[in-house]
Image (cartoon, helix red, strand yellow):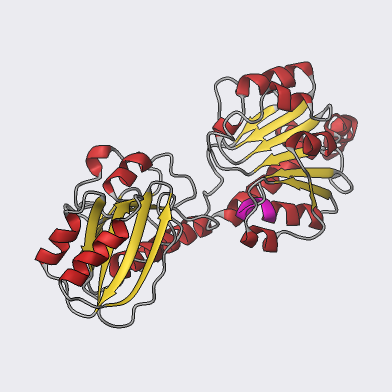
Amino acid sequence: MYRVRTYNQIAARGLERFPEQGFEVGPDLADAQAILLRSHKLTASEVGQGVQAVARAGAGVNNVPVELCTERGVVVFNTPGANANSVKELTLAALLLASRDVMGGLQYAKTLSNVTDEHELHQLVEGKKKRFKGRELFGRTLGVVGLGAIGSRVARAGLDLGMRVVGYDPALSIDAAWRLPGEVERMDDPPSLFARSDYVTLHVPSLPETRGMIDAEALSAFQPGAALLNFARQEVVDEAAVLHALRSGHLGAYFSDFPSAALAAHERAFATPHLGASTREAEENCAVMAAEQLTDFLRFGNIENSVNFPEVNLERTEGYRIAVTNRNVAGTLGQVLSVLADADINVIDMLNKSRDDVAYNLIDLEVEPTAALTGRIEAIGSVIGVRTFDD
């Protein structure tokens, strides 16, 4: 029986993806082999000794102690792309609001609720509407920093609005490149993109190299009056530098999904309360992807969309499967195979992959492994853990 402990409210459509037979899923389970969560801040004590995997129903894993999990051989999954359309649509809403003073117009119209004479109301509206004049997006240039699942969708939407779109991504994957419309002009570096763009939108992960990437120097390369949109991560922007650029008028507006005490009072800084993935569809998509990844890992040892382990997929055919996690030290796999050879056990199929300091092996055996055999493998100094499978 596989036990999956949940934190937060997980969409029912995702929970339904766990098989009815052989799985127990719920918020109050002890001795769980896996954890499924959304925004819950997972502590070290909650990652018990029996936990083999943690799945975050979302893209970011800043609420998961990834380094600790890696040391313990715990695979951490996320769900990249599952909320991409939701974030794209919120970004488009901000793009339109950055172009047209819709919010100012709405607020002004609310102040007219006590005007009962229709003629007077129309006169007031006609006299004041010029205060809310904006500009069209058509023909303007949109700069997209980060061209992954979300950024590529935003780029395509910008093209559909008649905008010129330039993009920058130093680590563009092959899959992302296939998704990217050919009309997007690739830029060699961020300053070149900033100098071309009327609107700059950020869609990069929070990494050491991206934190604070929009600082005073970066903002100095922006066109005067350009708008900055950040629906990626709060820490990729230096908020003090943004506030200074807003006060000087060099930056026209700042829209983000991260309310900030430093920027809250400025009239041209706008924030939504972490609404990027707050749609029913996004929550369901993330839950479904996370549940399917956990199920495949628990039943067969396969790994897809992990942030700390290599991607491994070995088709399950016949025999008995073990999974060996080890520190990425030369010679470890040879020692494992030697243990099997000494026991006169034939290997039917196997797959070995590594990522940074961790290596992961799926090995299908001709005979069922005994506790004594797995114990001898675990005794190898660089081995972190060994799993056997019931399926």
Q: Position of residue 268 (x, y in %)?
A: 71, 26
Q: Which residues are magenta?
A: 148-152
Name the one closer to the observer, 182 or 332: 332
> Does residue 84 lie above or below 203 as drawn?
below
Q: Position of residue 128 (x, y in %)?
A: 86, 30
Instruction: Determine the image quadrant of residue 127.
Output: top right
Q: Residue furthest bottom?
A: 318
Q: Position of residue 341 (x, y in %)?
A: 21, 71
Name the one closer to the observer, 68 or 383: 383
Residue 112 visible, this angle = no
User: Is 149 one of the magenta-colored residues?
Assistant: yes
Tell me the residue at 60%/49% (across/down): 87
Q: Position of residue 26 (x, y in %)?
A: 25, 57
Tell me the residue at 19%/48% (across/down): 49
User: Is 3 one of the magenta-colored residues?
Assistant: no
Q: Quadrant of the N terminus?
A: bottom left
Q: Residue furthest left?
A: 372
Q: Is residue 171 left or right of residue 13?
A: right
Tell me the residue at 61%/23% (across/down): 239
Q: Is residue 279 left or right of residue 246?
A: left
Q: Is residue 117 left or right of residue 82?
A: right
Residue 292 visible, this angle = yes
Q: Quadrant of the C terminus?
A: bottom left
> Does residue 239 lie above or below 195 as drawn?
above
Tell me the residue at 83%/30% (across/down): 223
Q: Main secondary structure of the magenta part?
A: helix
Q: How many marks?
A: 0
